Image (cartoon, helix red, strand yellow):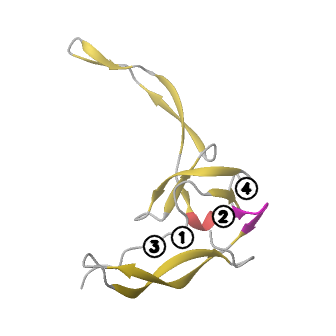
């Protein structure tokens, strides 16, 4: 039996607020979504320092050493979407749309849209 793909309702580019952890209360834009691990990387949140060594690759230019600060992933359960000045949960609604086939005929189909649980508006 095939494994079910894990879904994450937070998308790249969303503005989120951290609701738990050391950066609680911080807001930032989602840079990357790691769907399999159910984690997101948020701009300016959960910053970690990495100490790297100088690497020379046989006379070619290698990497420079030093202390690099970067964002680490945070679990999606620790963030909420910011919408209209406050945070909201995310829901889904199925909208019926009319699509057109290459031969010109039309048919009815459904598409899934994200909605704000607080306001009911499409995100």
Choose top left, top right, bottom left or bottom right for residue 104: bottom left
Give the magenta-colored segment's residue range. 81-87
Asked whether the residues under the numbered discs 2 and 1 touch, taking CB atoms below 8 Å apart as contact, a structural biologist would say yes
Q: Secondary structure at mark 2?
A: strand
In three-dimensional space, the C-alpha distance between marks 4 and 1, rounded to whole angstroms, equals 20 Å
Name the residue tied to disc 3: 7
Q: Nearer the viewer, mark 4 or mark 3?
A: 3
Instruction: Name the residue carrying label 1.
Output: 9
At x 62%, y 68%, the residue is: 123
Quick one: 51 or 11, which is closer to the camera?
11
- Residues at marks 4 and 3 touching, judged by CB atoms closer than 8 Å: no
Mark 2 residue crowding within 10 angstroms, few (<14) / some (14–19) / many (20+): many
State the residue position of label 4.
24
Q: Residue at x 24, y 85 (%)?
A: 1
Q: Are marks 1 and 3 in contact (CB under 8 Å)?
A: yes
Which of disc 2 and disc 4 is earlier in sequence?
A: 4
Determine whether 110 is above or below 33 in the image: below
Disc 1 crowd rating (10 Å Cα; few below 14, some 14-19, many 20+) is: some
């Amino acid at each position: 039996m095939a494994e079910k793909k894990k879904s994450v309702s937070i998308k790249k580019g969303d503005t989120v607020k951290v609701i738990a952890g050391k950066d609680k209360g911080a807001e930032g834009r989602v840079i990357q979504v790691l769907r399999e691990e159910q984690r997101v990387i948020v701009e300016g949140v959960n910053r970690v320092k990495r100490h790297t060594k100088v690497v020379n690759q046989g006379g070619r230019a290698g990497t420079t050493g030093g202390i690099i600060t970067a964002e680490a992933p945070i679990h999606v359960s620790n963030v909420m979407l910011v919408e209209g000045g406050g945070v909201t949960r995310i829901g889904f609604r199925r909208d019926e749309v009319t699509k057109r086939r290459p031969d010109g005929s039309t048919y009815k189909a459904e598409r899934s849209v994200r909605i704000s649980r607080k306001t009911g508006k499409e995100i």
